[in-house]
Amino acid sequence: MAQAENKKTPEPVGTGVPKHVALIMDGNGRWAQERSLPRSAGHWQGVEAVRRAVKAAGEFGIDYLTLYSFSSENWARPASEVDYLLSLLKRFIHTDVNTLHAEGVRILIIGERDELSPDLRAEIEQCEALTRDNTGLTLVVAFNYGSRDEIVRAARKVAAEVLEGTLDANDISMETLGRHLDTDGIPDPDVVIRTSGEQRLSNFLLWQCAYTEFVFVEEYWPEFDHNVFQRALDQYMNRDRRFGGVAASA
């Protein structure tokens, strides 16, 4: 009985402006296809939508904005498309990071890095180092990211500590695993917004989204703007988050 009493669930909170918003940026290809344009045109317009989203997040007072930019499964796409997506990431680093740094944005990149090219890995590390001490919006970019892979990598780290004798297996907890995830130090998302009308997580932040709200909008990612963002936040803020408890009025 005492053990049950020690298990705490998060206290219900009012759904004001979320502290952490995660975005699944879906629909670039379909947006382009409907306009008889190459998929690359959709990805190009998607970068413009990223800029709008980051600007709007700052205006809304959001503390953390996570973007699902490139999943570990995206490597299976045609090589030409993968190369183009990588070029867009490099272009973002070269053209946008200094501006974001001047605006006080802190940039974090989550995902597997060991298999990335040394030059790309170095550029990622440089933009993180440049913005490390900024205190404005934290922009989290999920690149070469897959949640199952993240959890497996975290489990391997925990297992290594047990083998080294620095951690007792009986002391492994949810907090232990959480400290070894890519998102260590980042609060769990309050809401995940996915564009294009699709309603699935696609291997994104599976551990972190245990109590996250979901909002699905019909617009493709290149159409995502301040108004769409506001409408999605309005949906979130009209909900009653109970975290497994009961409503305050019940």
Image (spheres, helix red, strand yellow):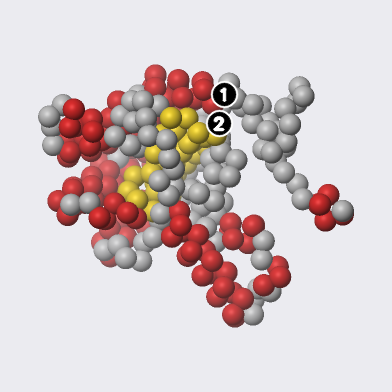
Q: Amino acid at mark 1?
A: Met
Q: Residue furthest front?
A: 199
Please name the residue shown 67% across and 38% down the image: 243
250 sits to left or right of 195: right
As displayed, is residue 77 above or below residue 100?
Answer: below
Q: Position of residue 173 (x, y in %)?
A: 67, 61
Check if mark 1's residue and mark 2's residue have beta carbons within 8 Å.
yes
Find residue 19 and report its horizontal and vertical position in percent. 56, 34
Residue 126: x %, y % from top left: 35, 55
- Taking the image as drawn, is residue 124 in sight? no
Of the two numbered discs 1 and 2 on the same chain, state the one appearing first in sequence. Answer: 2
The structure residue drawn at horizontal position 16% and vertical position 26%, both measured from the top left corner, is 35
Residue hosting label 2: 18
| Amino acid type, label 2 | Pro
Q: Dot 2, crowdedness within 10 Å: few (<14), some or many (≥20)?
A: some
Q: Quadrant of the C terminus?
A: top right
Q: Which mark is residue 237?
A: 1
